[in-house]
Amino acid sequence: MLNIALIGLGRIGRKYFKVLKKNEHFNLIKVLRKKNYTRKNTFVKFYNNRNKFFSKNKKNVHAYIIASPLNTHYEYIKKILTKKKPLIIEKPIVKNIHELKKINILSHNVKHPVLVNHTDLYNPAFKKLEKKLKLIGNYRKIKIEFGKFKKIYKINNKSSTELPYFDWLPHPLAITVKLVGFPNKIKILKEKTTIKKKFIFQKIHLRLFCKQKTIDIFFSNDCKIPKRRFEIKGDKGSIKYDAYKTKSLILKVKNEKTIPYSFNNTPLENLLKVFHDAIIYKKKINDINLSVKVMKIIFLIQQKLNKTNINVNLIRN
């Protein structure tokens, strides 16, 4: 069993904490969070001082997870990569292009596993999709829909740069980059930003073009019915996944019976399994390369949207 340290115990950090408590591969030994915190009946040590967190019992830590607020990512990534320790980073990895360039350079010579939690890429359904994709023949259209009512993005004059799309678009963009690569053209077909009682809501429709393929991405954090689905149409069939409605991957091939695939493991459980195996079997996995491409697209979209006049703070932790 590997000892792991968790940075951040907010909304995302608590998900890791819950899964790690039941995980057979990792032993969570310490957590860094803002406030002083203790929990009964646990062997986990909690810190609210980062110097003490990194210095105490450091030789026993085999790996780290960064699930802290976005504005802290850069310093933590830099510190842990320098320590040459295996690492999981919550997306988005950094908040600006300056940090992205530095992390990209720093990651070039990394030999230990560095994973980024692009949730859908570690979804067992996506892994199955990659294996079955060739069965639908030549495909040219991909449709990805993400949506949920999320009242967590709030106007705050003390911070800037982040809108809901900045937090959400790494999901569908990671799918896009993984399947077809970096787009050669990006169009924003629709964008609507509204503010309700100091909370920010967005609806966006993007169209990306890459290798004679068209990718339509729909996102909203103001929808009553949650959506997390993607569909790919080829000349021999189609393949689609719906995380909320059918909770299965549906493969349709012409003149053949429709095949549904169901899955037991959650994406987070699968992420931790991949991470564990990469450490144990010394596999070189570096998700930063893909994440750099994802963030470059985000920053291009940011320029197109030209929303820098709205000061907001992403309330995640």
Image: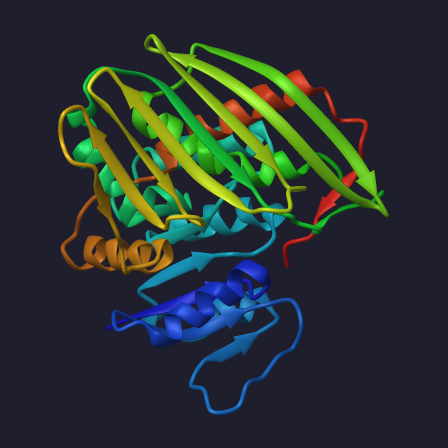
**Residue in the picture at 39% in, 76% down:** 21
Instruction: Please provide percent x and percent y for residue 194.
Output: 79, 34
Q: Nearer the viewer, residue 163 or 33?
A: 163
Instruction: Please provide percent x and percent y for residue 44.
Output: 45, 80
- In the rendered image, which quarter is residue 48 located in? bottom right
In the shown orientation, is residue 217 left or right of residue 306?
Answer: left
Q: Nearer the viewer, residue 17 or 230?
A: 230
Instruction: Please provide percent x and percent y for residue 119.
Output: 41, 47
**In this picture, is 189 found above or below 68?**
above
In the shown orientation, is residue 244 left or right of residue 286?
Answer: right
The reply to whether residue 159 is in sight is: no
**Residue in the picture at 30% in, 40% down:** 286
**Residue in the picture at 51% in, 32% down:** 100
Q: Nearer the viewer, residue 271 or 53?
A: 271
In the shown orientation, is residue 1 left or right of residue 147?
Answer: left
- In the rendered image, which quarter is residue 86 located in? bottom left
